[in-house]
Amino acid sequence: MAKTVNILSDAEIALVRESSLLVGRTLAEVAGKIAPGVTTSQLDRLAETFIRDNGGLPGFKGLYGCPSTLLISVNQEVVHGLPGDRELRDGDVASVDCGVLMNGFYGDSAYTFCVGDVATEVRQLLTVTQECLARGIANAIVNNRVGDIGHAIQEHAEAHGYGVVRELVGHGVGRKLHEPPEVPNYGRRGQGVLLRDGLVIAIEPMINMGTKDVRQLEDGWTIATRDGRPSAHFEHTIAVRAGKAEVLSTFSYIEDVLRSKGELVS
C-alpha cells in the first residue's frame, strides 16, 4: 500500500526554506575551513556550534542513533561517513551532508568538496553529479512523476559512463527529515508517485565513477563503492511547483566562500 505524501502550505514551505538556508550557511562555514590536514571531527564541531548559535538544532544528531551533526564521506565513501580523527589529504573529495531542524521543520542539503589539488577526472565526476541534480530538479514539476526525476538523473550519469547508486534515495522533507515519497536517482518516465504542488522533497544524486555497486563498512554507517573508485553526492531540498521547482536550499553561500579562496571550479 502506497504511503501518503504530505503537501505543505506556503507558510510551511517558508519554514523549510529557513532551515534549508541555515544548512547552506553551515556548509559555507565548512567550505571556509576544509583543507588538507583538517580532521572531519573538527568540521563536525564547527557545524554543530554554528547551527546552535543560529537558532537551529542539528538535524541528524540523535536521529536513528546518528552520533554527529555532519555526515562526511571521503573519496570512495558514498554517504553516511562518520566524522572522526581522519585528516583530509590533498587530492581528496569529501561529501558533506547536513540537516537542520528549526521551527518544527527540517532542511537537508549536501555538497561534495575538493580538498586541495584534485584529479581532473574526479572533478569531472563532481561536475556531472551537479548537472544530474539540476536535471532532476528540472523534472520536479506538477503532474510529472518521481520516475521522471530519476530517469533524468540516470540518463545523464550513465551517458558519462558513471554508476548510479540504487540502494540509497532522496526523500520527502517536512516535520520529519525522511518522509514519503522515496525519490530514486534512477527510474522510468511516467512511473511512480505523482508530483503535486507543495510536495517538498530532497533530490540527492549519488554517482560513482565506476560501477553502481556499494557496500556497508564495519562501522554500520558508512556506505562505500564496492570497486573502491570515487563517488560524488550533491543534494537540494525543493518544493514541487507548476512549470519550475522552487529550490529551498542553496549552494550560493558555499560558492561565495570557495570563490574567495580561489577554489571554485565550474
Image (tube, grey):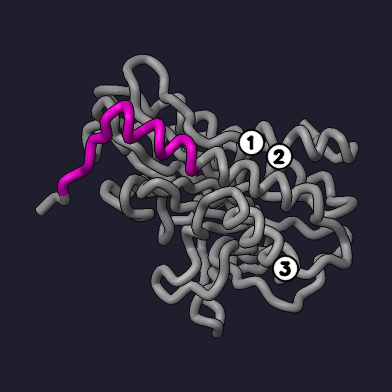
Q: Residues within 10 Å of mark 1 (few under 14, many from 20)?
A: some
Callouts 2 and 3 close, C-beta under 8 Å? no
Element assignment for label 3 = helix
Residue 122 spot, x, y in % from top left = 75, 49
Q: Residues within 10 Å of mark 3 (few under 14, many from 20)?
A: many
Q: Residues within 10 Å of mark 2 (few under 14, many from 20)?
A: many
Q: Which residue is mark 3?
A: 40
Element assignment for label 2 = helix
Residue displayed at 83% across by 66% down:
38
Magenta stretch prevailing secondary structure: helix
Is residue 14 covered in magenta? yes
Q: Farthest residue to the top: give it.
A: 243
Q: What amino acid is labelled 1 in the image?
A: Phe
**Residue 254's disc number:** 2
Residue 71 spot, x, y in % from top left = 58, 63
Q: Which residue is mark 1?
A: 251
The magenta stretch is 4-19
Callouts 2 and 1 close, C-beta under 8 Å? yes
